[in-house]
Image (cartoon, rainbow, N blue to C red):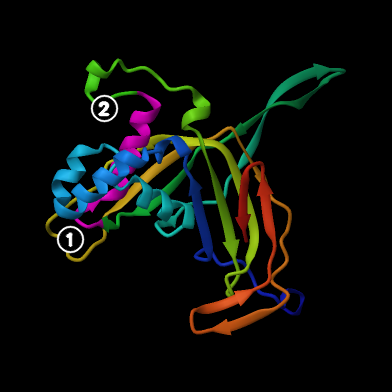
Amino acid sequence: MSEFQDGFQQDNRFLCQLFVPQGLLSVTLTDSTILGIVDALFPSIGSRLDQNFSAGQAGSWLGRGLTCIATRLPDRAFETQPQTMYGITENYPVHTVYTDIQCTFLLPLVSNDNALPRFFNYWMNFIQNQFNGPDSGLNFTFPDDYRGRMLLSTLDKKDHTTATYFFDRLYPKTVESVPLAWEQQNELAKLNVTFTYSYWTLLPYQPPPIVEISTPLGTLGIGGQVNIGDLSINL
């Protein structure tokens, strides 16, 4: 144990941040202003006026990592091709295989709106237009318009990042049904979403803050920043 004085990684210390395509959150100023007034006066009517109701709030929760309560670290495998020569068979890697990743989300409410199921349904309809069923045309959107990104970070007991996995070109492949039952008392509903992506990579190590200051609002520290293209994330 003297070799591992800093301890071991715990499986409940993680942060899963999902950065959705901006097209999902784009609402014109006029539309958002009108809908904001209607939502304030008549919330139930406002939710019917806009298919994208609560998308901004849901996108904020996902980006801050507030609702994902379970997932797993990614894996990677090589597809190999056998080559037989000189009396033995050797296998050579010819292709990389990434397994889909599943995340489990809690379902917070915005007023009386169940925001996350609505949001993921909206994202699926954004990929293939089914807002009005087959009458919508069932056309698929260009991939760059519906694919997002995800950061999955493991943390230590002080909430410092110990490793960060970056998933690129990610989108929901399966949005599972949510079980409901009267006999379950005070159980929180959970939504399982399976994401597919093009690849993942392990970001460079980020050392913990050099200075940490305790304040009434929490601990402030001087830390690092990771820049991934146009995505800037404070770790």
Q: Find out whether residue 134 is within the magenta segment.
A: no
Q: Which residues are magenta?
A: 110-128
Q: Nearer the viewer, mark 1 or mark 2?
A: 2
User: Residue at horizontal 65%, vertical 58%?
Assistant: 163
- Residue type, numbered disc 1: Gln
**Quadrant housing the N terminus:** bottom right
Q: Which mark is residue 184?
A: 1
Which corner quadrant holds the C terminus?
A: bottom right
**Residue 6: quadrant of the picture:** bottom right
What main secondary structure does the magenta stretch of the protein show? helix
What residue is at 40 percent from the left and 27 percent from the top?
A: 127
User: Which residue lies at the image location 12% right of the left edge and 56% below the top edge?
Assistant: 182
**Is the Cβ of the residue at disc 1 closer than 8 Å to that at disc 2?**
no
Q: Nearer the viewer, residue 62 or 69?
A: 62
Mark 1 residue element: loop
**Is residue 115 part of the magenta span, yes or no?**
yes
The x and y percentages for residue 204 are 73, 53
Looking at the image, is 9 positioned above or below residue 75? below
Residue type pointed to by label 2: Phe
Q: Residue placed at 64% from the left, 74% from the top? A: 221
Q: Which mark is residue 131?
A: 2
Horizontal arrangement in the rendering, residue 70 relative to residue 6 (left or right) = left
Tell me residue 162's x, y (percent). 65, 63
